[in-house]
Amino acid sequence: MLAGIYNIVCEQGTTFVRVITLEYPDPDDPESYIPWDFTDYTARMQIRRTIESSTVMIELTTENDGIEFTNPSVGELTVRMTAEQTADLTSSGVYDLEIISDTDEVSRLIQGNFTLNLEVTR
């Protein structure tokens, strides 16, 4: 499976919440889609200044409450950062979001640019 491209815009110093629902084409009916079932999965997402950067600006996971499978049987997950976390970000970058099955199979779901709109009011 190829990762989808989804470019994120985040406002520095604000609470960031994105609800994402993932589906894939039904192999038996190209006109319909099947929701991804996230039951028994974990997830992780990293934002870095560049793909080559060794420094992680922020890491969100199901373990640190940055990602939650809000409705796993219909492919819904929520990515969230607190206002304090987004205030600590200082630049735009790139990210990807991966899921890990209970058998340790890793799949990259989405990736893209992470654009940070800097805060004026502090």
Image: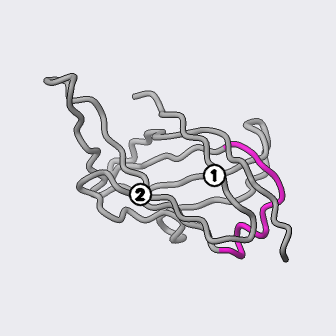
Residue 56 in the figure: left or right of residue 23: right
| Residue 24 pos. (x, y %) | 30, 34
Quadrant in the rendering for residue 11: bottom right
- Name the amino acid, label 1: Gln
| Residue 79 pos. (x, y %) | 51, 61
| Residue 78 pos. (x, y %) | 45, 61
What's the distance in space between the residues labelled 1 and 2, CA to CA? 14 Å
Choose between 29 and 103: the one closer to the eye.
29
Residue at x 33%, y 48% (from the top left corner) = 103
Task: Please tell me whether residue 5 belongs to the stretch shown in magenta.
Answer: no
Q: How many numbered badges does the structure rendering display?
A: 2
Residue at x 39%, y 47% (from the top left corner) = 104
Residue 57 versus residue 23 in the image, above or below? below
Q: Which mark is residue 46?
A: 1
| Residue 45 pos. (x, y %) | 57, 52
Residue 111 in the figure: left or right of residue 72: right
Q: Using a 10 Å C-alpha cutoff, classify the residue at mark 2 as few (fewer than 14 neighbours), some (14 to 19) or many (20 or more).
A: some
- Name the amino acid, label 2: Thr
Residue bounds of the magenta highlight: 83-94
Choose between 18 and 46: the one closer to the eye.
18
Q: Which residue is mark 2?
A: 42
Residue at x 77%, y 40% (from the top left corner) = 50
- The quarter of the image holding the N terminus is top left
Residue 12 versus residue 114 in the image, above or below? below
